[in-house]
Image: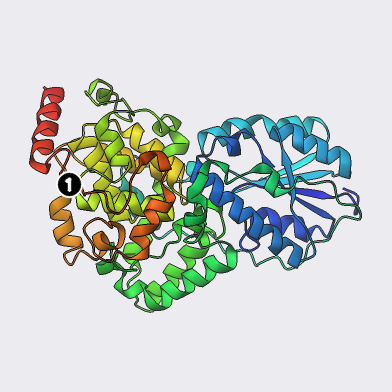
């Protein structure tokens, strides 16, 4: 290509300057680089909290690009049309991006590359947000893994390659194409009154992600194995928020953990969690139906409630089940856009088993409220808890939320942090819940705390009866 022919780099969910294969390639050409983010149908389909968090990430990433002499061009519309328009406006001869693996993105991307190449545009697609391309990790019979432990054994000692150095300069265009104002996209619109509350808890940007990782590796990794299941302490890395929008790469986290292993720090448990995320993405790539259909067809006949307006579902959504661990977790979600992983397991088990409600209802609620929403991990997590997924928990494994509370929050630190009712002086976190929720819920801190809508023993017995009938 001519030395002055621009390179368009299409950012998707990879908002960083470090360890970015496509960006490194574009910078190395020494041609003008046009960074673009496109608000297309994939972005439009995001739930309220993921879209809101993506908007925060775009704002911060735009500032980082300005720091290296560039700028982020924002366009709205279908991806192919937006790219064709930019090519026409800039004279770009090359378009690059990093691969995505979710069903919507795969369907979109399948036609993009040949369409652009047929018009004489050079296209380069680089590996995306996984450690290993999904088609490169295979069982001895040549198929993908459906069980985690063999998958873990297969990848734990693989080399994902060296990280790319952070890009510190991009050659600018002589005349920049027009860009939509980010505010015009109203990425926070669906958050309504919760936007200001959740924003106080979000940690945004590549620099924040790297600082968070460094602090965790210095202060948290050795205690991770014993602290990661305790929701009342700061015992996890919180990398999920940054991995979800690509403010840090999985390879950067992997490298930090491998370095910790070499000096004897307790990184094995965390490494397994990172590989669980990898496992989820490989599963979703090979079996995209996992996103909204039972992995195991036999579960299609299970008598789940599928009415999202049912009183029990509304109580679960609003943190009013009368089961303290469940309610604390659901309120943490509304206030922060995040939920502790142990709590995610408890609320999912309670909804799908004690309340006999379809996992898709829970999946959609998380999809709308998690700022670290990840379509692969979300789908795998819900189907694992419900019993319908690959490598799922056995049908008879029903987490008892009262015993879980006694085991992991014996001093009720987590419960007091998020449930205001019954406390003479509730903490700010518990009170923020009433600022975040819709006014139509008509809840205040003075509302009496409810009795359990379904007692734990009763719910367990009902679930076991239904599972037994399905099996027979």
**Left or right of residue 399: residue 198:** right
**Left or right of residue 129: residue 307:** left
Q: Position of residue 238 (x, y in %)?
A: 42, 62
Q: Is residue 314 above or below residue 420?
A: above
Q: Quadrant of residue 382?
A: top left
Q: Position of residue 369 (x, y in %)?
A: 43, 45
**Left or right of residue 357: residue 364:** right
Would you say residue 318 is visible in this rendering?
A: yes
**Left or right of residue 188: residue 391:** left
The residue located at (24%, 20%) in the rendering is 301
The residue located at (73%, 61%) in the rendering is 65
Q: Nearer the viewer, residue 128 or 220?
A: 220
Q: Is residue 435 above or below residue 17?
A: above
Q: Position of residue 30 (x, y in %)?
A: 83, 60
Q: Nearer the viewer, residue 26 or 425?
A: 425
For disc 1, the marked residue is: 399
């Amino acid at each position: 290509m001519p030395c002055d022919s621009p390179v368009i780099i299409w950012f998707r969910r990879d908002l960083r300057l470090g360890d970015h294969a496509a960006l490194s390639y574009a910078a190395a050409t020494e041609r003008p680089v046009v960074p673009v983010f496109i608000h297309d149908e994939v972005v439009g389909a995001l739930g309220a909290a993921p879209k809101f968090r993506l908007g925060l990430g775009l704002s911060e990433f735009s500032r980082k690009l300005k720091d290296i002499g560039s700028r982020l061009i924002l366009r709205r519309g279908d991806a192919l049309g937006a790219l064709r328009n930019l090519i026409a406006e800039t004279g770009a001869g090359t378009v690059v991006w990093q691969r995505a693996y979710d069903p919507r993105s795969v369907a979109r991307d399948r036609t993009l590359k040949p369409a652009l190449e047929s018009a004489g545009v050079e296209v380069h697609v680089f590996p995306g947000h996984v450690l290993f391309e999904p088609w490169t990790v295979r069982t001895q019979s040549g198929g993908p893994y459906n069980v985690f432990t063999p998958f873990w054994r297969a990848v734990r000692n693989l080399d994902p390659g060296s990280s790319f150095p952070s890009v510190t300069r991009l050659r600018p265009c002589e005349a920049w194409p027009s860009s939509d104002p980010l505010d015009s996209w109203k990425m926070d619109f669906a958050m309504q009154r919760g936007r200001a509350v959740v924003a106080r808890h979000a940690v945004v940007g590549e620099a924040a992600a790297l600082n968070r990782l460094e602090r965790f590796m210095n202060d948290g990794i050795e205690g991770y194995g014993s602290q990661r299941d305790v929701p009342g302490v700061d015992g996890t890395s919180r990398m999920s928020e940054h991995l979800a929008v690509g403010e840090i790469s999985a390879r950067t986290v992997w490298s930090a953990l491998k370095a910790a292993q070499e000096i004897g720090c307790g990184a094995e448990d965390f490494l397994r969690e990172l590989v669980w995320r990898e496992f989820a993405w490989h599963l979703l790539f090979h079996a995209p139906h996992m996103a909204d259909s039972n992995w195991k067809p036999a579960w299609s006949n299970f008598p789940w409630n599928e009415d999202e307006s049912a009183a029990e579902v509304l109580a679960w959504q609003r943190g009013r089940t009368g089961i303290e661990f469940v309610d604390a977790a659901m309120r943490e979600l509304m206030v922060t856009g995040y939920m502790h992983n142990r709590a995610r397991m408890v609320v999912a088990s309670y909804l799908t088993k004690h309340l006999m409600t379809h996992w898709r209802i829970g999946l959609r609620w998380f999809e709308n409220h998690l700022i670290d929403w990840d379509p692969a991990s979300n789908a795998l997590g819900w189907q694992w808890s419900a019993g319908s997924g690959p490598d799922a928990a056995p049908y008879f494994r029903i987490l008892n939320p009262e015993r879980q509370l006694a085991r992991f929050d014996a001093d009720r630190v987590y419960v007091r942090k998020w449930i205001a009712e019954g406390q003479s002086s509730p903490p700010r976190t518990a009170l923020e819940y009433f600022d975040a929720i819709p006014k139509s819920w008509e809840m205040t801190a003075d509302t009496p705390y409810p009795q359990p809508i379904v007692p734990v023993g009763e719910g367990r017995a009902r679930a076991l009866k239904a599972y037994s009938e399905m099996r027979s």
